[in-house]
Amino acid sequence: MQGATASTKTPLRRLALHTTTTCSSTASAYGKCILATYTDMSKDACKEEFAKFIGCVHEAMKRKW
């Protein structure tokens, strides 16, 4: 199974790595916002937290979407 562990270059694996390590604090803040407002969710309720999280992911992956 050496090929499975060596393939951290694939976009999905890189995304998983960066969202759980590099951007964990911004992901946590976004998740907490969603959790706090999920019963009364409105458009853009967590817009600021999401913008910070997605900005971190973009920077970590060095890719513009």
Image (cartoon, rainbow, N blue to C red):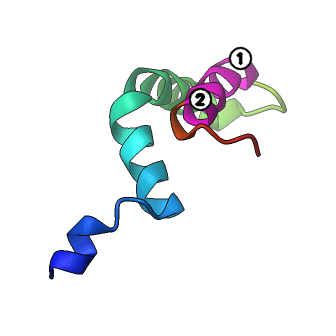
Q: Quadrant of residue 1?
A: bottom left
The chief SS type of the magenta part is helix
User: In this rendering, would 58 be left or right of 17?
Assistant: right
Question: Marks 1 and 2, how far apart in space?
Answer: 17 Å
Residue designated by label 1: 48
Reading the chain from its start, which is encountered first: label 1 or label 2? 1
Magenta range is 46-59
- Mark linked to residue 3: none
Instruction: Please provide percent x and percent y for residue 5.
Output: 22, 68
Secondary structure at numbered mark 1: helix
Q: Which mark is residue 59?
A: 2
- The answer to whether 2 is drawn above or below residue 30 in the figure is below
40 left or right of 57?
right
51 magenta-colored: yes
Quarter of the rendering containing residue 45: top right
Give x and y (percent) for residue 63.
66, 42
> Residue at horizontal 35%, vertical 60%?
8
Q: Amino acid at mark 2?
A: Glu
